[in-house]
Structure formats: structure tokens, C-alpha cells
Image (cartoon, rainbow, N blue to C red):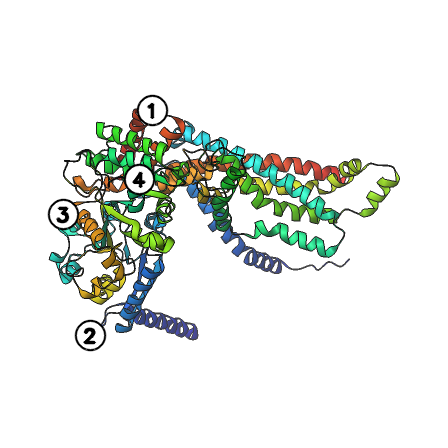
Amino acid sequence: MRYNFKGKSSIQGSSLTRWFFVGPAMLVVICLLIYPLCSTVFYSFTDKTMIRSSYNFTGFENYQRILTDSGFWSSFVNSLIWTVFGVLGQIIIGFIGALCLNRIKSPVMRNVFRITAIIPWAFPSIATAMVWKWLLNGIYGFVPVSLQNLGLSEGLVQFFSDPDLVLPSLIFINIWYGFPLIMVNVYAALQTIPQDQYEAAQIDGASALQSFIHITVPHIRTVVGLLVVLRTVWIFNNFDLIYMITGGGPAGASSTMPIYIYDTGWTGRMVGRASTASVLLLLFLVILCVLYFKVINHWEKEDVK
Amino acid sequence: MKKLASAVLLLLMSISLVFAGGSAETSQAADGELSGTITFWHSFTQGKRMEAIQAAAEEFMAMHPGVTINIETMAWGDFNTKWNAGLTTGDLPDMSTAQNTGEVAEMLNVGVLHPVDSVIDAIGRDRFSANALGDMTVGGVVYGIPYYSHAQVMWYREDLLAAAGLEVPQTWDEFYDAAVALTKDGVYGAAVSLSPNDLLGTRYLNYYVRSAGGSLLNDDLTANLTSTEAIEGIKFWVKVYENCSPAETINYTVNDHATLYYQGITAFDFNSGFMIDGVRNNRPDLLPEVSCAMLPRMNEDDPLYSAEATHIPLVIWENSEHPEICEAFIEYLYEESNYIDFLSAVPVGMLPAISGISETEAYRSNEIVQQFAEEEAVIAQAVDMGRAIGFEHGPSAQAGLLANQGIIEEMFQDIIMNGTPVEEAAAAAEAELNEIFATMVQ
């Protein structure tokens, strides 16, 4: 191996060159991530509103108010339900879809199935929201009217105005919207599993379930783990779907943390309080991600062994 | 060194030339010809209205080659959010529409508007309604120009009333009884829409309270949701929701809400003359059956009243570098042919905000204006008699905040969904509004 030794000035030049290349990326991170983050934390300790130009430092008053606000806690609980069931549903349906896709022998049919199944993911969320709003509309929606005409419900089922049904309905739409992403990624991971392992297991007399548990799962669990992390953060922070369909109503029954923050900051114009809720949301997600990554790292270490 | 100094000098001279050129380009030329670029925000997202404004802007630019008008349109519901955000980011227009006179009061609260008296004088001060100008006047200075007007009236279906043997309701009790009677066979008597992202709950409550002689604001501009009139009004609309309205409308905003009447799903509605255009576009077969009357009263012998008249204003922003272009363009928009072109985009929906227009042949020749002449007269009467929500105490930021915070709508939802007692929910909403007033009003 040959080493190329250089003088001091050359090393300095190289160092400057490195900064030159890294600089723009750092600038972007500072402008788009660090600055907004720091300003949000700063404003969370003030009484800043969107209308008044001046504001005062109020210490932990916003935190005290937010943490004693029943609306915050109900939105937080709704967020947990929305995220847990949304992620679980997307993973389960996406996983089953990927396994089905993997079993299709004909490449043509496999592509047809894959393209068909990805359609929900390709829809813009505004289109998804409008279509489901129309389908589940409690006055003339196709689904409630059909259920009534078939004698399966007494009146029109109120998917969006019944507080007991609104969140499950939204979770269902979210699962429908998001499962194709999981399916495609898990399918890609399934393609990487060497077939000879299955053949060896078959020769050793392993059942299909045993092959699945001992071969399939270990190979794809890291991919699934990363998908769970990503989907958790995305779904927890999802705003557009809920806002466009119910706006968080009725009476906050479908209000999640992003809706709560929007209502506080934009409708209520309380920038300070909205910042406080954002900081609390960020803290929660950071803790969650740390836990997730610990588990994934553990799996990766096991894989190396 | 000499070369370097020369290069720096050349660079500085070039820069100064560029800035000198830029300055000449963006100021009014010596011959008085207008020159510069302005940004105009408006929320006329419907095709015909947008086209009318765009056409007027293009003609104006053709007449003044040095002028560029950049038009940015945004949804009605997004407008308030957009300019509120602009206060922080500095992204504000030179001129814009406003949602109503209440919003102008909010803008004045933060001191972002440019006086428009000179434009009003140029168009003719006596041609405007004194009420409309008064709603946007502070300290004797006017800050908004009414572009068009409309008012809230009660819309009904003549065929449904006739089939049920009912007369047009004159009182709230008659309205409720008729709405209950007409709630059958897939038709609902009236929709009560209560999304906190819109102001319909506030609007409906205001009708009732105003008809009883009350107000949603006290004289000291604090919120008043716990008066006898307000409590009775809340109970009344909850009763209408429970017995005559589709349950789904608890989350409806104004567009979803109005569509129910356009499509013949509701028998009554409360709105302006925009209903005609909506019905024409959705169910033209129902057009001969729709009509309107003044809002119901508490008692039949009470005098007629108007609870809400809206004058959609044009405003010039204080930050504008070219108020003279904005003023000239606004005057151009009010020129008779331009103005009638714009109004005819939604005939009867947008009534002229200046006198001398509705009598012209060009205005009256419109087919819809002729067909709905009686309805236009009813709405015009309501415009003359009415003011914006909360403006019975004069223009105030509190009146604007009362309607656009969604707190009254949340109160209704809380009562209906959670069974919270009316008095308790009203007191909580009142306290919340008063806290916002104290925080926001400067």
C-alpha cells in the first residue's frame, strides 16, 4: 500500500476544501433545522402571539398551562391511538400484502398486483381525503347509504360525526393510505433472502411456520424496524388527512397533537403556547426514537453474531 | 495594486449604476406616469370572479406599461391565516381584499393599513353606504373600501312549503315548526353546521340574539354568551340541530353546508344571494323554487331587522411602496363597465357597494338579476339595515375575533357531543373569548 505524505499547507488546504464541500449542507441544516428548533424552544418560554409584535418572557407558564389543559391530554391520547393502530395496521396489512406478492409466480401478474396495490400511496392526500369524505358522508355517502339499503344498519352510520366512530374511521383511511409503502419495502427485503436457506430448512423437515419464524423474520426485521420508526414519526405528525376530513372534530374527538398545535398557533394565534406543545411533542418523539433505535441496534448486533 | 484599486472602483461604480437604475425603475416617473410592481391578494377563487379581476388587471397594465400587478389568489378560509403569518415573515401584499369589515378591524388593531380616503373621494364618498364606511373608519380616517355587499337572509323552498301547506315563517318558533315538519323523505328542515374552522355557529347565535335585542358583545367589548338571549339562542340552535339537521353537519364548514341547500337536501338555509348561483350550478331545476325573506323575529309584530350585513373591502397595506398604483387600480376597478363585469360574475350574490350601478341598463339586463328582483330587494334591505357581527358597538378587533376563533362553535360541539350543560359551556366559552381579547387587542 502506498501512502501519499503531504506538507502542512497542503493538509490545511485539504481541510479548507472539506469545509467548502460540507459548508452548504451545514448551512441548510442550520437554517432549516437548528434555527427553527431553537426559535421554537425560545418562543415556548414567551407569550408571543401572531398579532402582537412585542412579547414577554414568561418562564414555564406555558408549560404549566399546556400540561394542565384537558384538550392537550385528549389530543395526546388520540395521537397515541392514531399512531399505534395506524402503524400496526399498516405493518400487518403491508406485511401480508408483501408475502402474497412474493408468492405470485408470474412476473407479469406480480407487477400488475404491485402497481395496483401502490395506487393508494400515489394519491395526493387531498384526493384521498375528498374521496373518503364522500364515501363515508353521513348524509349521502355511498357506504352509509349502502349499509342502510342492505339492512345492515338502522339509519345512516355517522362515521365522521359519531365521536365513537370518527377516530377508528380515520385510522382505517390512514391504513388504506399507508400500507403500500410497507408492502413494497418488505417485498424488497423478502427478495434478498437466499432461497437455499428455505430449501435446506425443507430438507431438514421444517414446517412453513418454522421457516417463516427462523428464516424470514430474522432477515427482514431490521427493515421492518426502520419502517416502524419512520411510520411512527410520520403518522404521529400527520396533519393533512385529519384536518381535511374532520378538522379534529367533533368536539375534539379526532384532534391529535398536530391539530392541537395548529389550532393553538394559527386559529388561536398563541405562538408561545403552540411552541410549547411542539417542544413537548418533539421530546416525546425523540424518546420514542431512542427506544426504537436501541431495539434495532440490538437486532443488528444479533445479526452480526 | 493599481489594477486591484481600479477593479474595485469599477465594481463600485457598476453597483451604484445598477441601484440608480433600479431606483428609477421603481418610482413614479417625472411625467406622472405610474411605474412599479404591486402584489394583490384576493380570495375570489371562483372562475368568473377571478377572470374578471385578472382581465381588469391586464387592461390596467396595458394602459400603464410601467406597472406590473402580481395577483395571488387564496382560499377564503386561508386568507386570515396568510396575512397573520405575513405579520411575522414580512410577506404582505400591497393591496388585498379582506373577508369582511371585522377583519379590517383586526388589521387596524395591528396597524398595517394605509388610509384610503383619497380613493373614496375620487369614486364619490356619497355613493357609498355610510354604515359600510363607518365600519372601517377610525379617528375619522377610512381604511377600507367596500367592493361589494351582501347580507344574511332566510332562504326557503317554495315548493316544499306549499306541499306541506305552510307559510313562510315570520318568527323563530314558526321557523322551527316548519323545519321539523319538512324533515322527511331525505330532506332536512335546516342544517346547523358547527365546524370550529368556520363561523356558522357564531352567525346563527348572533341572528337569534340580535332578534331578541341583545348582542354577543357587552358595551365594554367583552364577550357576552351568558345573557338570557344568548342562553336561549344556544338552546334554540341545539334543538334545531337535534331535530332538523343532518348529524354530519356538526363538522361542516360553510361550503359543505351551503351545498346541502344547493342540492335540495335542506329546506331552509341562512345565507346571502350567493345561494342563487349555487343552486343554478348544482340543481338548476330547483331555481324557480328558491326564494328568500328577512330573518325570523322573536314575535310577529317585532320590527324587521338585519343581523349581519357584509361589505367585502379592498384595502391598501401600509408597507406598500406604491400606494399610488394601488389607488389608481382600485379606482379603475370601480369604473362602471369593470365593476358591472365583476358583479355579474355572481349576480344578486354580490350587490353593488356604490349607488348608481344597480339602476343601469347593463346591470339590470342580467337574466338572474331580472328573475330574482324580489330577492335582490330583500337582500338590499338587509344590507341597508345591517352591520357586521358585533359591530353594533362600533368597529372593534373584538368583533372580528369573536367570529373567527371557533370558540362558539367548539361550545356548541361540547354541548351536543358531551352533554355539557348550556350555562356551563357558555360561561367557559365566554371566559375563553375574554382571555383572547385581553391577549390580542392592542
Q: Which residue is mark 3?
A: B139
Alpha carbon of mark 4 to alpha carbon of mark 2: how far?
70 Å
Dot 4 or dot 1, earlier in sequence: 4
Alpha carbon of mark 1 to alpha carbon of mark 2: how far?
69 Å
Q: Which residue is mark 2?
A: B31
Residue A35 in the image: state x and y as whole percent: 45, 46
Q: As rendered, which of A219 and A248 lies closer to the eye?
A: A248
Which residue type carries mark 1? Pro
* Discs 4/2, front: 4
Which residue type carries mark 4? Ala
Q: Determine the secondary structure under disc 4.
A: loop
Alpha carbon of mark 3 to alpha carbon of mark 4: how far?
53 Å
Residue A48 in the image: state x and y as whole percent: 34, 39
Q: Determine the secondary structure under disc 2.
A: loop
Contact between marks 4 and 2 (CB within 8 A): the answer is no
Q: Determine the secondary structure under disc 1.
A: loop
Dot 3 or dot 1, earlier in sequence: 3
Q: Determine the secondary structure under disc 3.
A: loop
Residue B53 in the image: state x and y as whole percent: 30, 63
The lab-note entry on whether marks 1 and 2 share a chain reads yes
Residue that appears at 30% across and 64% down: B52
Q: Which residue is mark 4?
A: B164
Dot 2 or dot 3, earlier in sequence: 2
Quadrant assignment, res B367: bottom left
Q: Which residue is mark 1?
A: B421
Q: Chain of mark 4?
A: B
Q: Quadrant of the C terminus of chain B?
A: top left
The lab-note entry on whether marks 3 and 1 share a chain reads yes
Residue B115 in the image: state x and y as whole percent: 19, 55
